[in-house]
Amino acid sequence: MSSKKHYSITVNGKQEEFLAEPRELLIYTLRERLNITGPHIGCETSHCGACTVTIDGKSVKACTMFVAQADGKYVTTIEGIGGLDDLHPLQNAFKEHHGLQCGYCTPGMITRATKLLEENPNPTEEEIRFGMAGNICRCTGYQNIVKSIQAAAAEMNAAKEAAE
Amino acid sequence: MRYERPQTIEDATALMAGAEANAFVLAGGTDLLVRMQSDAFEADLIVDIKAISGFDAITQTEDGFVIGAAVPSAALSEDAALVAAWPGVVEAANLIGSTQIQGRCTIVGNLCNASPAADSVPALVAADARAQIAGPAGTREVAIADVPTGPGKVSLSKGEIIEAVLLPKPEPRTADAYLRFIPRTEMDIAVVGAAVNLSLGDDGTISAARVALGAVAPKVLLVEEAAEALIGSNLDEAALEALAVACSNASNPIDDKRGTVEYRKEVAGVLARRAAQTAYARAGEN
Ligand SMILES: Cc1cc2nc3c(=O)[nH]c(=O)nc-3n(C[C@H](O)[C@H](O)[C@H](O)COP(=O)(O)OP(=O)(O)OC[C@H]3O[C@@H](n4cnc5c(N)ncnc54)[C@H](O)[C@@H]3O)c2cc1C
Ligand code: FES
Ligand code: FES
């Protein structure tokens, strides 16, 4: 007997309907079922942050959620933050300030950083390091990640002021 | 694996009571899912309690605060009245993991996972919090310290689910504080955790105190001798020294890569001193 259930999740604004085992981890639903491969898998145990997505406005590690827990929810991944033709200021800043080397951690870093800057549009270096503590990078030594987030914050604040 | 998301506590306890084996309550999942991944075990039944009505609320009552079992840790610091009344409980709960964990994890999950190093537990014990438990035979209340019985073990019987944590209303001029020591600055397991809750009398001396330690024994310790060292004092050096000695003596820690037995005993005293100083300063402002 199949124990598959019907689920409906809105990912990057698109409603997805499918049958899945409730135990399936959301990261596999995204990557293997829905072909949304921006969020990565680093550890599968909530430690590295490579799988970070936004669910109903909060940063969540998609490896530590059953698909059943995401039913009916709104999920944003790096694909929903910006694309090649319309990079988000954070994506631009990571590019400009060498906020990545191999890039494996980057989708999770940037997805988390979008929320960090919503929670705190003017973070200090310490607040950035604390707010990003759930995301691990084995390449950069973090210095340029901090710089990238600071640069993006400055740009986003300037754009907001200009609009006002 | 069967996954259920009941709307009422009656349905939830009935599901747990009727389960044959391998049934787990699921709150934030930050321990349970990680354990299922790293130990590669399967559950037969998961009862997700996040949809039970009222479970996601922090309520202020005449007697204090009721924190529902599904309230994420991050929500504690958003409740100004709770932060004012129990700053140490809130700072302890906010130490659990990173932002991604904070949005999901619960203090009840922290308690029921029964890790000796759980951060919120010493603070809850020092605050004299209680657990409200629902089960097939009705509800009961127990002291937080009586929930864990040892590493990974709790005193809940089959079908029982913790509904809420009950925090008393603090007496005037009362405050608490929690400190932990970890090798990294965030996201690590406590080498030692120390919580102090104290009240000041009219003359400014300490009239009541509770001191609890984490990560230095198989379960949280409430150290009576440490509280006695504080009561009647103005937190002078002699009282602080007696507090530190009582905490070091009460500690019965393990040796591991995070710290030796000797080191942990020493740190327990140092952290208790500092937590007492913070609680004392806070109580003076209340
Ligand atoms: C990266 C990372 C960092 C972490 N850092 C810390 C840290 O710094 N400090 C710390 O203390 N912990 C830490 N933890 C552990 C964990 O996040 C906490 O213990 C958390 O509070 C667990 O809450 P939860 O709601 O996610 O529990 P869950 O995983 O949902 O549940 C934990 C256990 O409790 C049981 N349970 C849950 N709710 C109830 C209930 N209402 N009634 C009966 N049983 C119940 C479950 O069946 C399960 O066995 C960390 C975990 C990770 C993955
Ligand atoms: S894959 Fe999810 S935190 Fe590492
Ligand atoms: S850039 Fe390689 S892991 Fe961060």
Image: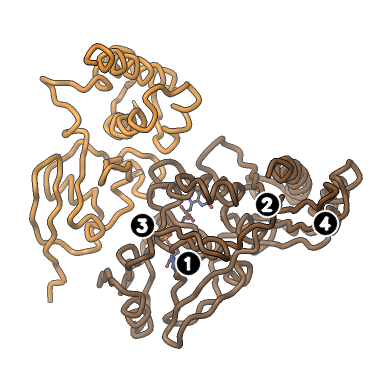
CA distance separating discs 4 and 2: 16 Å
CA distance separating discs 1 and 3: 27 Å
Q: Using the image, tell me which numbered label, if any, was put on residue B249.
A: 4
Of tags 4 and 3, the one toward the viewer is: 4
CA distance separating discs 1 and 2: 21 Å
Q: Mark 1 points at which residue?
A: B164
Of B100 and A138, nearer the camera is B100
On the same chain, marks 1 and 4? The answer is yes
The amino acid type found where label 3 is placed reads Gln
Which element type, helix, strand or loop, lies under badge 3?
helix
Give the left or right position of residue B272, taking residue B101 as reference.
right
Mark closest to the chain's N terminus, 4 or 2 = 2
Of B200 and A50, nearer the camera is B200
Residue B279: image x %, image y %? 71, 45
CA distance separating discs 4 and 3: 38 Å
Q: Mark 3 points at which residue?
A: B37
Q: In which quarter of the image is residue A128?
A: top left
The amino acid type found where label 1 is placed reads Ala
Q: Residues within 10 Å of mark 2 (few under 14, many from 20)?
A: many
